[in-house]
Amino acid sequence: MIIFFRSNKEIVTVNFNANNIVLSLFKNDLIISYVKCELINFEIFKLNIFNFSKVQLLIHNFLKSNNLKNPKFYISASCDDIKEKIIKSRSIIDDKNEIYENSTLNWNCYNLGSFQDSYVYYISGISHSLIFQYKILAANLGMNINFLLPENAVLLNLCTKYNPDFLEKFNEKADIKNCFVDFVNNLNIENYISKNLELDINKEKIFLSTALGLFFWGKE
């Protein structure tokens, strides 16, 4: 999911996943600072925050080290407990409720684009209690949430916007992560990284791609 925090100049992207929190700072369309913080004591488990103080401290330290006081935040998260799927429809979906399977979740539907005679939609559902936790995190950091969506939505959006052939190769029954593997592997991510930043790009490519996807999403 992504949490948008409004501010003025610099953009900080934060990716929450099972093993770490990844923070990137964008300035002038380049990543100029990057930190991956390992989570070794179950500070976050299945996106549930069990140690608010530690998570807040990690984000605060990144801001402090980069002399940031009021950046714009784009935050994503990945977890198997987020319900998601991609569907094709010959007509535009107006009534989103007709495609949702569980009313106890907060559902969102995103139009990825169209191909031939069909529209392609990404659908995701996340628990209300999980959303509330991240609202608390934002409040503790003094920031306001605009909306949430999963990490896969960010990468799929990046694919459709910057790879015109993506929808042509799209397979509705394929695993969602497999939909963007080739795109991420072939992405020239180094074009968006400051030359002053030393990184093992191949090792960090999926996290860097997510950060880039968040950055571009915020510019749309």
Image: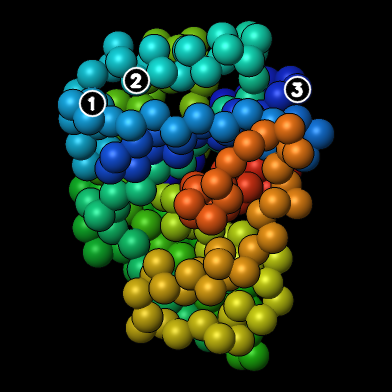
User: What sort of colour scheme is used for the picture?
Assistant: rainbow
Residue hosting label 1: 43
**Relative height, residue 98 to residue 74 (above, below):** below
Q: Residues within 10 Å of mark 3 (few under 14, many from 20)?
A: few
Looking at the picture, which amino acid does disc 1 mark?
Glu
**Relative height, residue 175 to residue 205 (above, below):** below
Looking at the picture, which amino acid does disc 2 mark?
Val
* Quadrant hosting residue 129: top left
Viewer-side label of 3, 1 = 1
Is the residue under label 2 in contact with that under label 1 (CB below 8 Å)? yes
Which residue corresponds to the image point at 81% horizontal and 34% vertical from the top-left? Answer: 28
Viewer-side label of 3, 2 = 2
Q: Residue 55 carries which label?
A: 2
1 lies left or right of 82 = right
Looking at the picture, which amino acid does disc 3 mark?
Lys
Spatial separation of the CA atoms under disc 3 and disc 1: 30 Å
Q: Position of residue 100 (x, y in %)?
A: 31, 63
Q: Position of residue 37 (x, y in %)?
A: 39, 29
Residue hosting label 3: 9
Callout 2: helix, strand or loop?
helix
Which residue corresponds to the image point at 55% horizontal and 46% vertical from the top-left? Answer: 200
Q: Where is residue 157 in the image (x, y as percent from the top left)?
A: 58, 60
Q: Can residue 89 be seen in this view?
A: no
Callout 3: helix, strand or loop?
loop
Q: How crowded is mark 2: few (under 14 residues within 10 Å), some or many (20 or more)?
A: some
Spatial separation of the CA atoms under disc 3 and disc 2: 23 Å
Is the residue under label 2 in contact with that under label 3 (CB below 8 Å)? no
Which residue corresponds to the image point at 65% horizontal and 9% vertical from the top-left? Answer: 67
Please state which of residues 26 and 122 is positioned toward the viewer in this rendering: 26
